[in-house]
């Protein structure tokens, strides 16, 4: 017996379409972030059964960046896939990583923020930058 889709899944597309352009993109970007977390972390956990953690992490990270590009292009920014954008897209995550690492070091070592809280603060600063860089790269064509 097939279950009917939940009301949340039926209402979500209507809510997204009601949001203004940028707000809709931000909302879809956050959905993509959750998807990316599931793909990246889930892939890592699956690969751990056969590979050491370094290789599992590297492979799952690359796959997550590729899925993020596909999702960002097609769903978040509603742009066609382009080879040039796909080749530039990993730069977004390089910038995010380097900026995050620098902020993490500043928060923990200079401002004495606890190591468990600092990554959350880093995310608050890097997520908007990641959104803007993703938008620029995907829309630039």
Image: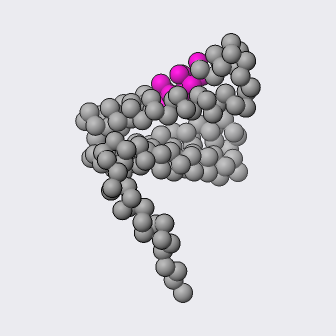
The residue closer to the viewer here, 17 or 30, is 17
Q: Position of residue 115 (x, y in %)?
A: 73, 27
Q: Is residue 102 above or below residue 27?
A: above
Question: What residue lies at 70% left-to-right and 51% top-to-bottom?
Answer: 49
Colour scheme of the rendered structure: one colour
Q: Is residue 58 left or right of residue 72?
A: right
What type of secondary structure mainly makes up the magenta span? helix
67 to the left or right of 119:
left
Looking at the picture, how far across and down is residue 91, in whole percent?
A: 43, 28
* Labels in figure, total: 0
Where residue 124 sits, quadrant-wise, is top right
- Please give the range of residues in magenta: 93-102
Picture quarter with the N terminus: bottom right
- At x 34%, y 41%, the residue is 22
84 relative to 42, above or below: above
**Viewer-side residue, 70 vs 59:** 70
Screen quadrant of the C terminus? top left
The stretch drawn in magenta includes residue 119: no
Q: At which x and y percent is residue 100?
A: 57, 25
Identity of the residue drawn at 28% across and 41% down: 82
Residue 102 showing in the rendered view: yes
């Amino acid at each position: 017996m097939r279950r009917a889709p939940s009301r949340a899944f039926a209402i979500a597309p209507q809510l997204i379409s009601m949001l203004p352009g940028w707000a809709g993109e931000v909302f879809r970007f956050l959905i993509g972030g959750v998807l990316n977390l599931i793909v990246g972390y889930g892939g890592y956990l699956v690969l751990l059964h056969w590979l050491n953690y370094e290789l599992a992490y590297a492979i799952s990270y690359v796959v997550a960046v590729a899925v993020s590009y596909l999702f960002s292009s097609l769903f978040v920014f509603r742009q066609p896939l382009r080879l040039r954008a796909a080749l530039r897209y990993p730069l977004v995550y390089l910038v995010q990583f380097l900026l995050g690492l620098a902020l993490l070091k500043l928060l923990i070592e200079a401002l004495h923020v606890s190591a468990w809280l600092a990554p959350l603060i880093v995310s608050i600063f890097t997520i908007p930058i990641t959104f803007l860089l993703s938008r620029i790269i995907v829309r630039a064509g």
